[in-house]
Image: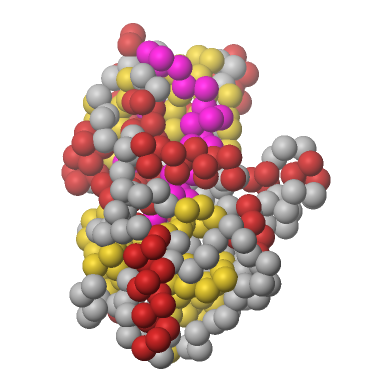
Amino acid sequence: MKAAIFRGPGELQIEEIESERPCPGEIVVSVVVAVTCGTDLKSYRRGHHKLFPTYPARFGHEFAGIVKEVGAGVTAFEPGMRVVAANTAPCGYCWACTQGRLSLCENLQFLNGAFAEEVRIPASIVARNTYRIADGTSFASVAPLEPLATVVHGMDKSDIALGDVVAVSGAGPIGQMFIKLARLRGAHVIAADQSPDRLAAALRMGANEVLDISPYESTAERAAALRALTPGGRGADVAIEAVGLPAVWEQTVQALRPGGTAILFGGPPQGATFSVNANDMHYFEYTLKGIFHHEPLYVQRALRLIESGALDGEDLITETRPLSRLGESLEDMAAGRGAKYAMKSHPAKEHLMTSTDTPEVLDDLVRVSRQLGSRSDLVLHGGG
């Protein structure tokens, strides 16, 4: 099968590798759609000490597909089921897990390999963080489940209330999801970015106001421009950082009102630092919260948001492309030419699996595929 192999920063190739078989407790999923994300781009450009401790490695973690094969002991899933999986599962027994801090699990097993024709899901993720996709929900809509789950985590820690003024710095896919969910909570949302396309997307997601920060040279000027849009110029009740740059972390804190809360979400480069005015921190009683990753509860809530129609993951996707254009798509993201790209492993095949196909139909198709004797004779496509 074809799969993306990551050999180090800037070295990503589509290669032919052996198809995998599931071990006990595991499943193999035929990938219908996999989508790019900011973490993919950061990893591609500078590596990632948590996701890629060694090279070479499989690449990609946001996807949806159809179960091809199940390992011994798997009873919750069977071939033909439409599924989506998160990229980790907490162990449940380490110190962090026993304290209820599942996103900080000391034994997180990361899933990589979604940019491929097939991906093997580890047993821990099959057991704790893999889900059936509801009929009527497209593969492309649900594929960005993982980043939405992290945003749900951020929202849970933000305590955004009805009528709050929320400033979101960064209107990429993560910022757009924060905008959407903050509006669903009844907040007045101000989005800041320097990309006209992203500011337009912020408005489509429901932002009440947008701020083009490109005319402002300094962090202090940008923060002041954000505060000027809030009632009385006091600042935001909650300010959210969705970029991952230390300067934007500082901008986010400086945009707060006295007593406000900053959600510092974007992952900065390893070793990066940022500064906070200690006098303001003390006398204005700021609350600063770092947000990392997700846990099964947030994944389940994110899935319900998608399946209910409250948020459609397809709205975040710029374009659907063949897997062969993965490297190009990451470069386009780096240049600001797109937000997320949906990659399909079999673009030459035209059998389109719709979001309303029943499990029985999918079972029949999987059986036919096996009878043909080739894993590539039948390609299951769908949803966007």
Location of the N terminus by quadrant is bottom left
Q: In the rendering, at what x and y percent does residue 157 appear?
A: 56, 30
Residue at horizontal 49 percent and vertical 31 percent from the top: 155
Q: Is residue 277 above or below residue 270?
A: above
Q: Is residue 293 left or right of residue 254?
A: right
Quadrant showing the C terminus: bottom left
**Rendering coords of residue 219 (x, y %):** 39, 36
Left or right: residue 37 versus residue 246 is left
> How many numbered circles does the render carry?
0
Instruction: Identify the residue at horizontal 33%, vertical 9% (top origin).
Output: 232
Task: In the rendered view, tell whether residue 193 sits above or below residue 227.
Answer: below
Task: Give residue 255's quadrant in the image.
Answer: top left
Instruction: Report the residue that reaches farthest toward the top.
Output: 232
Residue 280: which quarter of the image? top right
Where in the figure is residue 256, as x and y percent of width and height? 45, 22
**Vertical arrangement, residue 213 with respect to residue 348, above or below:** above
Q: Residue at x 35, y 58 (%)?
A: 358
Q: Check if residue 149 falls in the magenta segment.
A: yes
Which of the two residues, 35 or 242, is positioned nearer the viewer here? 35
* Residue 186 or residue 11, whichever sits in front: 186
Asked if the magenta segment contains residue 360, the reply would be no
- 113 horizontally vs 127: left or right: left
- Can residue 289 be seen? yes
Spot occupied by residue 364 in the image (x, y as percentages of width and height): 37, 72
Q: Which region is colored magenta?
A: 143-172
The residue depicted at 35 percent of the width and 50 percent of the height is 135
